[in-house]
């Protein structure tokens, strides 16, 4: 039984400019114990898909199951298995950290949960903030409380929607260590993130969404292999001729060409020289998830 | 503690933590009404024989406070949670629409009765009151608070902005409470306005509540309790239906 099963999930929103198809027949399974990444540009439908999974939104058609329980017809069991860290930094200003966690625990019918709450506070570096009102916490601390709230009922499946957006390095480290530990203990993790190096480091399998459709779904290692294996990277002061710039990824002075072999790399460098330009700081590196992502989104891969 | 009890307790603690604003302030408002209307109208207006105007006013003010605060509790909690975004914490839980209903309405009843008790304790100082039928007093207070709590739930789900909520409060709740006979007996109104008042369920709440104190009322308490009870059932059914379909809270 998969931990999460998306079955032909579609979602259409009514908008001022007519119906907007946010998700189009999305189907895939996440097995128990997986660390799964869901990637895609803004507006690809990641958050819509997670909202449907969490019961915050309903699909126009299709089904979603969590540990075999349908998120609509058997929502109580589905939600008991699911811990969701929302993307927005929301909090209840009336309560302190411990109260917020106790209530959240209570909503799931879990009583006398202070031992686990203390463990969560410790693991997330919140132990000294237990009595602090939510309003007094910094953004990073509020984010940690959101994680604790999602885990307070010990869900089997953990969903993190952009948990590290706008978060400092220290918290990212703490958070990933903790999540990785939970994953090792058998929890399934579904992660959406904009930080592709995080996804590459953590996720065993990745799905990429584009305009509401799954455009890539494979093991992270397989996705990395599928891309052009190398990238030629250098800096240049002037503008490249159009014939070259069309094939390159340009970020300010930095130019990157996907290349399969040495001959291709030589060709690019020769073309730059012929254009009368000077390539500085030349390096050749292995393709990473960002290259795969851009390839897929450009519609070039497979 | 089952899920709905946790939500109920959270909702009670929410208003209790700011009780100066949610309990003490409405008590003060009611006392001001008492002082001003009681002073101006005492001796001028006689509604029932043997009942002074000030004594007549006390149950009206108590019930008005119960109703307004029961409404304010569920409606303001929901609209705040929606706008702050923290309603998501409840939306993510296995709590059913019944749990939501009982938690929000239960906490509204709690706040309504707390404020009502406060208003009663302070205003009863100004008048000699009798307690002919205490059970009716309790029945109307609880039913009225529950109906307004459920109405607040509907308003809280419906409103997307604070000004929509203010409009609901100012154009529906306030006129209905003020025109329900808090300050006067509807028998003193022209026939047409008496008829209109009879369409207002708030009138029956206050009339029945007052019967519990004085044993006299404009209509029979049995008629009042059946109308208030029916209104509660209708409003609750709408509120539970809206919660079940996730009206404006689940996309």
Image (tube, helix red, strand yellow):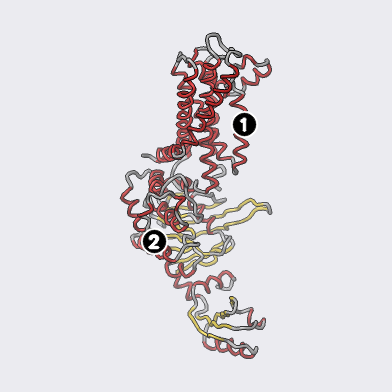
The answer for how far apart the CA atoms under marks 1 and 2 are is: 50 Å
Query: Residue B129: x percent and y percent?
Result: 47, 15
- The answer, for residue A69, to whether it is visible in the render is yes
Q: Is B16 located above or below residue A101 in the figure?
A: above
Point out the residue furthest to the left here. Answer: A115
- The image position of residue B185, as x and y in percent, is 59, 16
- In this rendering, the count of numbered labels is 2
Q: Are marks 1 and 2 on the same chain?
A: no
SS at circle 1 = helix
Image quadrant holding the N terminus of chain B, namely top left
Query: Residue at left 51%, top 40%?
Result: B77
* Residue B232 seen in this snapshot: no
Q: Position of residue B36 (x, y in %)?
A: 58, 23
Q: Examine the image and state in which quarter residue A245 appears.
A: bottom right
Please tell me whether residue A37 is drawn above or below residue B159 in the rendered image.
below
* Rendered residue at 53%/27% (across/down): B30
Q: Would residue A9 appear left or right of A169 to someone viewing this image?
A: right
Marks 1 and 2 close (CB-CB < 8 Å):
no
Name of the residue lying farthest toward the top:
B49
Mark 2, other Cα within 10 Å: few <14 / some 14–19 / many ≥20? many
Element type at marker 2? helix
Locate residue A134, reporting x and y percent.
44, 50
The vertical placement of A279 against B236, above or below, is below
**Residue at image mark 2:** A179
Please tell me which residue lies in front, A98 or A119.
Answer: A98
Q: Is residue B112 left or right of residue A17?
A: left
Figure quadrant of residue B178: top right
Give me the chain letter of mark 1.
B
Left or right: A184, with A44 as reference point: left
Which circle marks residue B172 in the picture? 1
Q: Chain of mark 2?
A: A
């Amino acid at each position: 039984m998969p931990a999460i099963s998306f079955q032909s999930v579609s979602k259409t929103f009514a908008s001022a400019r007519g119906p907007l198809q946010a998700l189009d027949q999305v189907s895939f399974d996440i097995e128990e114990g997986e660390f799964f990444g869901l990637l895609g540009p803004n507006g690809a439908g990641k958050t819509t898909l997670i909202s449907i999974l969490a019961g915050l939104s309903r699909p126009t058609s299709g089904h979603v199951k969590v540990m075999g329980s349908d998120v609509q017809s058997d929502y109580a069991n589905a939600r008991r298995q699911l811990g969701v860290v929302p993307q927005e930094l929301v909090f209840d200003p009336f309560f302190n950290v411990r109260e917020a966690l106790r209530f959240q625990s209570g909503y799931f019918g879990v009583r006398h949960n202070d031992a686990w709450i203390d463990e969560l506070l410790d693991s997330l570096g919140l132990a000294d903030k237990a009595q602090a009102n939510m309003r007094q916490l910094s953004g990073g601390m509020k984010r940690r409380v959101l994680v604790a709230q999602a885990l307070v009922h010990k869900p089997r499946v953990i969903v993190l929607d952009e948990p590290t957006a706008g978060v400092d390095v220290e918290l990212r480290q703490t958070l990933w260590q903790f999540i990785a530990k939970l994953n090792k203990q058998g929890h399934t993790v579904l992660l959406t993130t904009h930080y592709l190096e995080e996804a590459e480091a953590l996720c065993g399998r990745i799905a990429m969404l584009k305009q509401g459709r799954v455009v890539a779904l494979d093991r992270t290692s397989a996705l990395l292999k599928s891309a052009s294996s190398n990238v030629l990277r250098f800096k240049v002061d002037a503008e490249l001729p159009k014939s070259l710039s069309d094939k390159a990824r340009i970020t300010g002075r930095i130019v990157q060409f996907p290349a399969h072999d040495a001959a291709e790399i030589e060709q690019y460098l020769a073309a730059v020289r012929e254009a009368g330009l000077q390539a500085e700081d030349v390096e050749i590196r292995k393709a990473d998830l960002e290259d795969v992502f851009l390839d897929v989104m450009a519609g070039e891969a497979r | 503690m089952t899920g709905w009890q946790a939500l109920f307790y959270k909702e009670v603690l929410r208003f209790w933590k700011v009780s100066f604003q949610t309990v003490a302030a409405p008590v003060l408002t009611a006392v001001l009404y008492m002082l001003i209307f009681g002073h101006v109208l005492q001796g001028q207006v006689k509604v029932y024989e043997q009942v002074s105007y000030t004594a007549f006013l006390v149950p009206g003010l108590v019930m008005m406070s119960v109703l307004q605060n029961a409404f304010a509790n569920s409606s303001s909690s929901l609209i705040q949670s929606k706008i702050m975004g923290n309603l998501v914490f409840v939306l993510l839980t296995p709590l059913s629409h019944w749990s939501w209903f009982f938690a929000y309405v239960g906490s509204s009843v709690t706040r309504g009765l707390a404020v009502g008790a406060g208003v009663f304790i302070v205003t009863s100082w100004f008048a000699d009151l009798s307690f002919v039928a205490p059970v009716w007093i309790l029945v109307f207070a609880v039913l009225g608070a529950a109906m307004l709590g459920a109405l607040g739930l509907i308003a809280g789900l419906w409103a997307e902005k604070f000004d929509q909520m203010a409009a609901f409060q100012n154009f529906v709740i306030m006129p209905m409470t003020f025109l329900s006979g808090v300050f006067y007996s509807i028998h003193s109104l022209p026939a047409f306005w008496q008829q209109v008042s009879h369409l207002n369920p708030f009138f029956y709440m206050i009339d029945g509540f007052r019967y519990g104190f004085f044993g006299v009322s404009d209509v029979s308490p049995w008629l009042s309790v059946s109308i208030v009870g029916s209104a509660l059932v209708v409003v609750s059914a709408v509120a539970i239906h809206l919660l079940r379909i996730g009206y404006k809270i689940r996309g």
